[in-house]
């Protein structure tokens, strides 16, 4: 009887484990089935590098290059802001902060991660957007820059907590070795701790970027959503994610537009997958 | 033997939070000699040696009452700079802790943090340090390989070379042979005897034979107190305190 119980429990656990793989595969197959249909109408090259996204004109023009650039631009901006601040914050928490400050900081960063993206987007819309508009004297504050700043807030918790873990797991003996040679605290951080934690920090950055590129709600609310080729940070852009979210509701099932949105889904899936794999590689290189 | 006093601890009390780890310890460390600190685990010997180059500064809630002098200067005074102190008082740890870099970079590291950039000078100093640490012959053809590929004993000698490269005056050894085999241990001991000509050495050890072999002076610690301090030979042959006698004859510890 006991053996039978063990058997059932083992199989249940196995089934739960397999379920997650099964769901990923099913989702991916569904994406492929719906998305690949678009290539009956446009070639993959024209789809990826076409400069015009007019999905409901006649005939529809389905080039997603402006959307890819929009996503990349917003992500790049967010990375430029969040990576240095995030790493510096991780160094402060791991190495400099007194115990109490450290605990308060860690808790508040987790809190930052807990804010729903809609709320962040809303706050960005009423505070950041007018601010960007007046500082740069733009016709509208709904720009790539606003999106980048907002997304930087979202990437920060991931970057800080994973980079802090990486710094924390550097053997204590490295730090002692450096200090015993007469290195200053900063020299120890810069020349020993950061290099020793570099793979974990790179993984932190990649995962932060992965979080940003998949983000939808906040960017949709504050980047302006104009599917035009972006030329600077100070103009409205539209991201891949926002396109799907904004247009899926109005696309007729089975139309070219509908298929094209699924194809965008595939592109996003491939990008996120590549980022996660890279982050994994960095994490595992760590011994 | 030079009888000048290089370092001096005066009525040192040390607390980890509320636990007292050292009780009123006063000890003189003679220049160009080897001073061994022996005692059972938890007797405060590592705590004591780590005070000498202020490595205990890293521990939160630790508190020191008393004074430690290096060449008559109080190393814990407000004016004293721990970074400067650690450049003069080097340390070799219990577990070899080379950085995950090449052999060459490991030794050059101490020079880089001292802002010495002249390449020729750095190279000469690296070779010189490796020779002094009796490691040169074994690594001369692979200076640019990772230091982590070396054996434990070689890594420990590398750490000694790394320490020598910044020209310290005092070298602290915190159980340097605890993780090494007997042959590597013998090499390190030989090296310590060689080094005392130029440097002042303090060594913490679990191993009484080791203290007897390498040290000129030996201090016996028990439960945070300095029980007895004397020339090694006298301490081992004619201990004055019963507790010292009990420890060295193996009745406890």
Image (spheres, coloured by chain):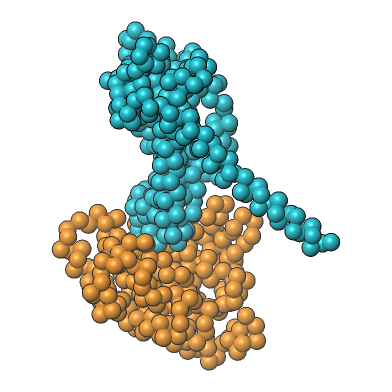
In the rendered image, what is the letter of the chain coloured cyan? A
Q: In which quarter of the image is residue B92?
A: bottom left
Q: Is A6 positioned to the left or the right of A252 in the image?
A: right
**Rendering coords of residue A29 (x, y %):** 51, 37
- The residue at the point 38 percent across, 29 percent down is A39
Q: In the rendering, at what x and y percent does residue B199 appear?
A: 33, 74
**Chain letter, colour orange:** B
Do we see residue A137 in this rendering?
A: yes
Q: In the picture provided, is B247 more to the left or to the right than A183? A: right
In the image, A80 versus B174, the foreground residue is: A80
Seen in the picture, residue A33 relative to A70 is either above or below; the reply is below
The quarter of the image holding the N terminus of chain A is: bottom right
Q: Quadrant of the C terminus of chain A?
A: bottom left
Q: Name above or below for residue B144 compared with residue A51.
A: below
Residue that protrudes farthest toward the left in the picture: B120
Residue farthest toward the front in the current orientation of the protein: A40
Name the residue located 79 percent from the left edge and 57 percent from the top edge.
A5
Q: Position of residue A82 (x, y in %)?
A: 41, 33
The percent coordinates of residue B217 (x first, y second) are 45, 81
Q: Please give the name of the residue rendered at 64% of the width and 56% of the height, measured from the top-left corner.
A: B18
Q: Which residue lies furthest to the right in this view?
A: A1
The extreme top residue here reads A139
Res A89 → quadrant: top left
The front one of B249 and B113 is B113
């Amino acid at each position: 009887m006991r053996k039978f119980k063990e058997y059932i429990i083992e199989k249940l656990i196995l089934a739960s484990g397999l379920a997650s793989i099964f769901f990923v595969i099913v989702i991916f197959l569904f994406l492929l089935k719906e998305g690949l249909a678009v290539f009956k109408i446009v070639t993959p090259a024209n789809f990826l590098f076409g400069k015009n996204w007019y999905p409901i004109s006649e005939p529809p023009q389905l080039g997603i290059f402006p959307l890819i650039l929009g996503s990349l631009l917003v992500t790049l901006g967010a990375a430029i802001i969040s990576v240095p601040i995030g790493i510096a914050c991780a160094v402060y928490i791991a190495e400099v902060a007194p115990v109490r400050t450290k605990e308060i900081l860690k808790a508040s960063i987790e809190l930052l991660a807990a804010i729903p993206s809609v709320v962040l987007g809303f706050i960005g819309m009423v505070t950041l957007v007018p601010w960007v508009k007046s500082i740069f004297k733009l016709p509208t504050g709904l720009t790539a820059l606003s999106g980048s700043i907002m997304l930087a807030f979202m990437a920060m918790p991931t970057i800080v907590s994973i980079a802090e873990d990486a710094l924390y797991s550097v053997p204590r003996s490295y730090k002692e070795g450096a200090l015993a040679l007469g290195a200053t605290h900063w020299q120890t951080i810069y020349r020993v701790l950061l290099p020793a934690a570099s793979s974990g920090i790179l993984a932190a950055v990649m995962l932060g970027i992965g979080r940003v590129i998949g983000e939808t709600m906040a960017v949709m609310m504050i980047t302006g959503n104009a599917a035009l080729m972006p030329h600077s940070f100070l103009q409205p852009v539209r991201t891949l994610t926002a396109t799907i979210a904004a247009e899926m509701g109005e696309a007729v099932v089975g139309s070219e537009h509908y298929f094209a949105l699924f194809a965008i889904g595939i592109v996003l899936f491939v990008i996120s997958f590549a980022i996660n794999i890279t982050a994994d590689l960095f994490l595992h290189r760590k011994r | 033997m030079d009888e000048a006093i290089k370092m001096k601890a005066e009525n040192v009390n040390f607390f980890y939070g509320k636990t007292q780890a050292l009780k009123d310890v006063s000890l003189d460390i003679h220049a160009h000699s080897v001073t061994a600190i022996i005692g059972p685990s938890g007797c405060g010997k590592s705590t004591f040696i780590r005070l000498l180059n202020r490595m205990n500064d890293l521990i939160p809630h630790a508190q020191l009452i008393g004074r430690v002098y290096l060449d008559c200067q109080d190393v814990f005074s407000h004016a004293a700079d721990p970074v400067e102190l650690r450049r003069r008082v080097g340390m070799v740890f219990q577990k070899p802790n080379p950085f995950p870099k090449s052999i060459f970079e490991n030794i050059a590291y101490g020079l880089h943090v001292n802002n010495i950039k002249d390449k020729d000078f750095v190279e000469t100093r690296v070779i010189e340090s490796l020779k002094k640490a009796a490691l040169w012959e074994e690594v001369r053809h692979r200076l640019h390989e990772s230091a982590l590929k070396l054996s434990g004993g070689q890594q420990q000698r590398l750490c000694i070379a790394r320490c020598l490269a910044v020209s310290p005056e005092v070298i602290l050894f915190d159980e340097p042979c605890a993780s090494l085999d007997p042959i590597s241990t013998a090499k390190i001991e030989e090296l310590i005897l060689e080094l005392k000509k130029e440097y002042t050495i303090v060594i913490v050890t679990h191993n009484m034979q080791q203290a007897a072999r390498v040290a000129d002076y030996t201090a016996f610690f028990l439960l945070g107190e300095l029980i007895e301090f004397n020339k090694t030979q006298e301490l081992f042959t004619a201990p004055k305190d019963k507790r010292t006698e009990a420890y060295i004859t193996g009745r406890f510890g």
